[in-house]
Amino acid sequence: MAIVSPSAALPLDAKGILGLAARSMFQLFSSISQGMFLIDRTGRIVWINEGYRRFLPALGFERVEQFVGHMVEDVIPNTQMRRVLETGEPVLVDLLTNKAGTFAVSRLPLREESAQGDGPVIGAIGIVLFDHAQTALQPLMAKFALLQRDLDEARRELASQRGRVARSGEAPRQAKHSFASFIGASAAAVEVKRQARRAAQSSSPVLLLGETGTGKELLAHAIHGASARSAGPFVSVNIAAVPDTLLEAEFFGFAPGAFTGADRRGREGKFKFADGGTLFLDEIGDMPLTLQAKLLRALQEGEIEPLGSNQLVRFDARVIAATSRDLPELVRQGRFREDLYYRLNVLPIRVPPLRERRSDIPALVEAFGDDIAQRSGEAPPELTADALALLAAQHWRGNTRELRNVLEQIGMRSDMQRIDGEEIKRVLAETGLEKIAAPEPVAALAGAAASDDDALLLRPLAAQIAELEARAIDAAMASTGGNKLAASRLLGISRATLYDRMADGAGALRR
Ligand SMILES: Nc1ncnc2c1ncn2[C@@H]1O[C@H](COP(=O)(O)OP(=O)(O)OP(=O)(O)O)[C@@H](O)[C@H]1O
């Protein structure tokens, strides 16, 4: 049992006790945190502790004097300490990202002593709770990134629907992408667009097969937009996102009072909503077996039976299904009906992953970079050739979606306008993507196309040489800002030859 010793040197007055508590807390924070610093009321750094010193090199300082004595925003990019001085409000936990990394931080105001503790703010204390916040907080951050992505996509969709409705007063369920939105001039991209354009001319079901983020939904929109049904609605259902118990009502609708809790007026299902247009069934491989029979019947008969009704309702919708799963394997395992598979597999289109069309990566980087910059209101970053080569060499398990995410991370984590290979490596390592997507042997950009699917090499040599020449001319023109003399020197040909080749259309790929 602890005995309270009368000789313990606890101050006897309240002020003394508070002072002791404050000092103990300060020492405790100083020892358990990764680093601490103080700023005065003007925002000047007046003190840092031992722990904080080790962040100085990453912030670009060799000596303490280059840091202490300077205004906080001049030495710590993205800091929010000034706000604490201005508002007097503490920030107990926040994430700070800058060139030194991502940190979980606290910011507390320091007030002049007063009886009520509401004296004027005379400074603030900054505490780095953890460095490597992305590792310590990985689960939380991953969840946050997913939510952020969903929110961004929902906002984009809403904004484009509003724009269309405002412009023309048309119904909001229209295709939002055309073939032009599918970026890519690689042979694999050109081929997938050719197949999709042909599919748009037919009214048979289309089956889009490809990994996540390869652009299946984008192509489904484009097929609808180029089809005879383009004036009709484009209705999309993500089967994986709807609980199994609700899918039937979602697809086929339900009759008034069909089940307990159902809307008294009944509701039409997606098949009926898509009447006259296209129904996009995303993640069809996740369709529960019980519902597959009903879907097959609907596709064969062109009729549906809403839940709780014994009446058949006719519909006229063209079906485009998509999946990232191996459907024939699901059929073998008895998890997908063979008859439904054949019904959907009339016009199969394989959408290639990004690693089979690496030569499209620079164009995608440019388009995504512009889009991200427009949203953030900042200038798009400029990527050097070695940065692009490094991106082109990644595995890209999440395809375009993952590429876009990396570019968003670069925007958040880098203060530089010009991004080189080292910076890309740093961001990939910081976001943990490097570990997920081990880089494949780095190929220079011009060579990156060579790692496209081997099948692409089995085409007439003349066409391949013309393509390579076109790409080289485009790259040289881009890197010299359109200066033909400089471009011809880079390529080791005369200016006259360059003019000739450009006139032949060799460099027409991206002009
Ligand atoms: N070739 C491309 N050009 C431009 N943007 C693309 C391209 N491919 C995909 N995108 C964009 O990447 C994102 C993901 O594409 P999309 O949703 O079409 O992929 P998906 O294959 O349907 O993925 P999932 O199977 O995960 O649903 C979208 O914002 C889409 O607009």
Image (spheres, rainbow, N blue to C red):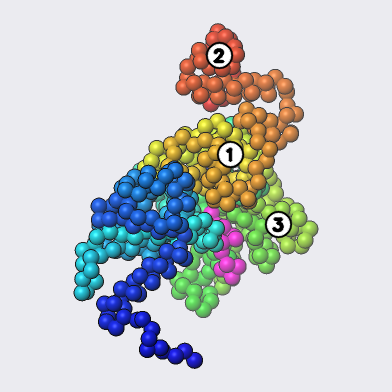
Disc 2 element: helix
Looking at the image, is mark 2 or mark 3 nearer the viewer?
A: 2
Q: Position of residue 382 (x, y in %)?
A: 47, 34
Q: Which mark is residue 340?
A: 3
Residue at 24% x, 62% y: name it.
121
Report whether 208 appears left or right of 9: right
Residue at point 22% right, 74% down? 116
* Real-space Cα separation, disc 2 to disc 3, in angstroms: 59 Å
Determine if residue 188 is in view.
no
Mark 1 vs 3, N-terminal side = 3
Of label 2 and label 3, which has the lower sequence position?
A: 3
Q: Report the residue at 67% width, 62% height from top.
A: 292
Residue drawn at x 49%, y 40% is 368
Q: Amino acid at mark 1?
A: Leu
> What is the span of residues highlighted in magenta in the rendered image?
236-246
For label 2, the residue is 489
Residue closest to the eye, 333 or 107: 107
Q: Which residue is mark 1?
A: 391
Tell me the crowding category of disc 2: few under 14, some 14 to 19, or many 20 or more residues within 10 angstroms, Cα based: few
Quadrant assignment, res 35:
bottom left
| Residue 455 badge | none
Q: Residue 72's x, y, as percent?
A: 33, 50
